[in-house]
Image: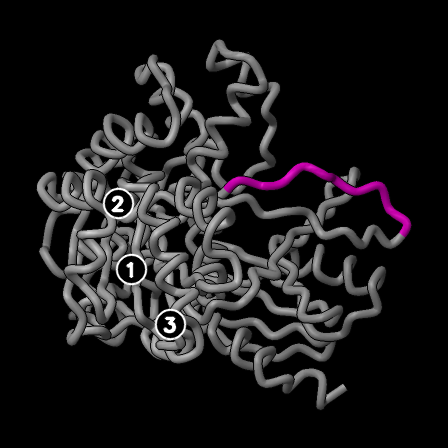
Amino acid sequence: MIQRESEAKLLDIASKFKAVAVIGPRQSGKTTLVKSVFADKPYISLENPDNRRFAANDSRGFFQTYPDGAIIDEIQRVPELFSYIQEILDRTKEKGKFILTGSNNFLMQENISQTLAGRIAYLSLPPFSLNEIRSAGKLTTDDDQLMLNGFYPPVYDQDIPPQEWCINYIRTYIERDVRQIKNITDLIVFERFLQLLAGRTGQEFNASALAVEVGVDVKTIQSWVGVLESSFIIFLLKPHYRNFNKTIVKRPKIYFYDTAIVCSLIGIRNIDHLNTHPSRGAIFETMVVSEFVKYKLNRALPVNLYYWRDKTGHEIDLIIDNAGHLTPVEIKSGKTINAEFVKHLNYWKKLSGVKESFLLYGGSQKQLRSDGTAIQNWRELDEINNAIATEIFQKQR
């Protein structure tokens, strides 16, 4: 098992709450993690038809079989269990009694909000982070290969070729999970929507334009985006609300959690194709932004990440808002630094009065410029997160 960064936080919240829900996309390693961390607890998967029938037809008898608690995998498959768990948790003072997992955040939140509010803690488990792959000694030094490989565990611990794995993953997701979350009857149209969305990773989400291309109405597009969000295929990066007396863009940007999925959906099969593809920069940006999101999720921290763009085209790829302390981050896939890389950072810093900024790029040179911009390879992005987390910048100001 590759050590997961979220393990320490999982143990921490299990010592404070009566139940913990570990959610995330399929194949992100949820089952492996909880079985390792809570090896003393019985494990029940509700994907198993026999277990599912037992839990659905005799819920009280099901829980009497596990008086000391259990790991219940894919619990959203039997929603009626949540009411029984509520009753059990109200009678006990034991912490970490139930560990619940699920790949469908929409169904879990709907049921938990009704029955388990205040009794349960969440932990979202994304695919592997850069550091997790690095610690396992499986990190390639080539950024293009890393984008093609993506970050899903089966590619690394089962040595499945990423393109083969992605094709089957997407097919399984569309044919199974989409039907489970929402009654989408025309899966061919939904798949086309998914492909068009992948071509827009790192771009503003324009529901009207997508609706025209897909051939459905705007409400359907918005509903489908909600499906993808709830199943951890995509996330929306909201625009930062501070406008500094500028007219700013108010649409969110859309990102995929994993670049291998993007490459598969838009037909990128090898490094040569990726090198010359017009979406390479957006895919690189997707990889870096998703790493910042993973850092937050693995520590159960608020995802306080935004972007900023005004109507004249000035844009900051990422703004980290740490209780009002803003840290701008620009992301460039190029390997050679040029003046254009920091142009928008300098413009935004003049507007905001912020002094520190970061440029993360594909090259290896490291600089700390007199204007307060730290330039470094994107693979060192955790230095930014750790500095903010320990309030180094605040102490220096």
Q: Mark yes or no: residue 362 visible.
A: no
- 269 relative position to 362: left or right: left
Residue at image x 48%, y 59%? 293
**Residue at numbered disc 2:** 271
Query: Which circle's residue, 3 or 2, is located before the other in the chain?
Result: 3
Under mark 1, the amino acid is Asp
**Residue at numbered disc 1:** 142
Of residue 201 and residue 7, the one placed in the foreground of this image is 7
Callout in the foreground (3, 2): 3
Q: Relative to 254, is 367 above or below?
A: below
Residue at image x 51%, y 72%? 376
Under mark 3, the amino acid is Thr
Q: Quadrant of residue 249?
A: top right
Task: Identify the disc placed on residue 166.
Answer: none
Q: CA distance from mark 3 to mark 2?
A: 55 Å
Q: Residue furthest bottom?
A: 395
**What crowding class fits label 2: few (fewer than 14 Cα within 10 Å), some (14-19), or many (20 or more)?**
some
Under mark 2, the amino acid is Ile
Q: Is residue 161 magenta?
A: no
Q: Please say if the residues under marks 2 and 1 sit with CB atoms less than 8 Å apart.
A: yes
Number of numbered labels in the structure image:
3
Q: Say what secondary structure mark 3 lies in.
A: loop
Q: Is residue 248 magenta?
A: yes
